Image (cartoon, grey):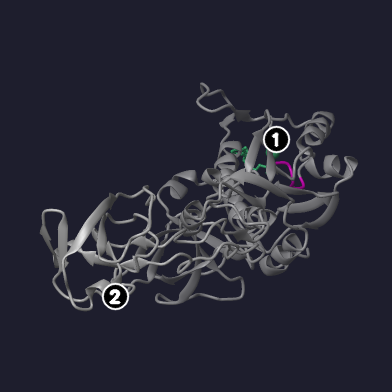
Amino acid sequence: MTLLEIGEAWQRVAACTEPLPAETVALDAALGRVAAEDALSAVDLPPFDRSAMDGFAVRSDDTVAPRALVVAGELAAGDVAQSPLLAGTAMGITTGAALPAGADAVLRVEDALVDGNRVTPARPVPAGTAVRYRGEDVARGDVLAPAGCLLGVQHVTALASAGVGSVAVHRRPVVHVLATGAELLELGAPPEPGRIHESNRLTLRLLAERAGAEVVVHPVVPDDAAATAAALETGLAGDVLAVSGGVSVGPHDHVKPALQQRGVDEVFWRVRLKPGKPLWFGRRGATLVFGLPGNPLSTVACFLLFVGPALRRLQGEPAAAPPYVPARLAVPARPADGRTTLLTARLARGDDGVLDATPSEAQGSHLTGALAASDGFVVVPHDAGELPAGAAVDALLL
Ligand code: AMP
Ligand code: MG
């Protein structure tokens, strides 16, 4: 049986992910989105020469040989002086207020000797003292977030300050989530003989939303060829279809033939991965289809390795890839049966800051109890043999 290496499988997925078209969103909805165009400042920043201190706007020439200046007015933040500052005068000014024309420095209140409506500088105030000049930070038209930039709080803050109310970002992918299996019970349903509680649709919805997608969840599909084909057709309406179960080789696995019947072209089937070997990937037009093996840990593993990074790419992150982080084995570990093996593991930072990985004693694609007691997976390559305690490994965090 030919199994695709994980890296090769990822390359094939990545090759099918073009950033989605742009849309304009309000700035308050832009966090975590990827700029589709350069986002420019709408103003100079500061927008005008303004005071950095509470004190008095002065003409620096008037302070060379300090003398009493007549206080000709008061300027608070938001005020605009109605007349220029004349020689021999000062104006009270607060932090952030616009300097009046003619003023070129601010005498700090701490350095001012005030007597009635006169103020005398304690010492000369050189031009520029306590002044924030127009445009010294940002000029109108400066790029604050280039196309392709993942918008963080730093960019949103800068754009808000720069008078920008909306930005062009790549559209979010719409992900349709489907699960197949006659045995599946709804969330919280009373137990029934021979049936199990379904979790994959919820897992996929939560992971896809966390990856920035909009998710449409479909009803569970029974293991029936016609019903599967019909459900898949409705699920092919978005950018991505993630369907769980039914991609193996059992007599009740209808997903692959149904996808073929609906005109979805296979890109690959089966990866050298445990759990997750039966992963199927294909496309119809621009819609990507992931057929995920039904065991809950297989679904999680395949999402972390393939679906999640594909969703980030669709949102305009061209470098998105499986989110491996470096870790160190606390105990020896080995791969299972010639496949690269994802072991559920506790992952905790050691004193040196490295993530120490302790795999669960029991491993299995159905062991959701072990999943609950884990922080994610460690990756043991199929050709690694037994890795000793202390070996450097990749981890995937949940
Ligand atoms: P399948 O991939 O359909 O052969 O399913 C593999 C195993 O995963 C079977 O034991 C199923 O009962 C189980 N399974 C399938 N779908 C789900 C699901 N949505 N949630 C939880 N377990 C599932
Ligand atoms: Mg099944």
Q: How many marks?
A: 2
Horizontally, is 259 left or right of 23 in the view? right
| Residue drawn at point x = 62 percent, y = 44 percent | 25
Q: Amino acid at mark 1?
A: Thr
> To which residue does mark 2 refer?
61
Q: Is residue 285 visible?
A: yes
Residue of label 1: 180
Q: Nearer the viewer, residue 149 or 103?
A: 103
Question: What's drawn in magenta, residue-wise?
Answer: 244-249
Q: Label 1, secondary structure: give it.
A: loop
* The one of 357 and 134 positioned closer to us in this rendering: 134
Kindly tell me whether residue 295 is visible in this rendering: no
Magenta portion: prevailing SS class: loop
Q: Amino acid at mark 2?
A: Asp
Q: Is mark 1 within 8 Å of ligand 2?
A: yes
Task: Give the residue displayed 39% in from the left and 68% down from the top.
Answer: 355
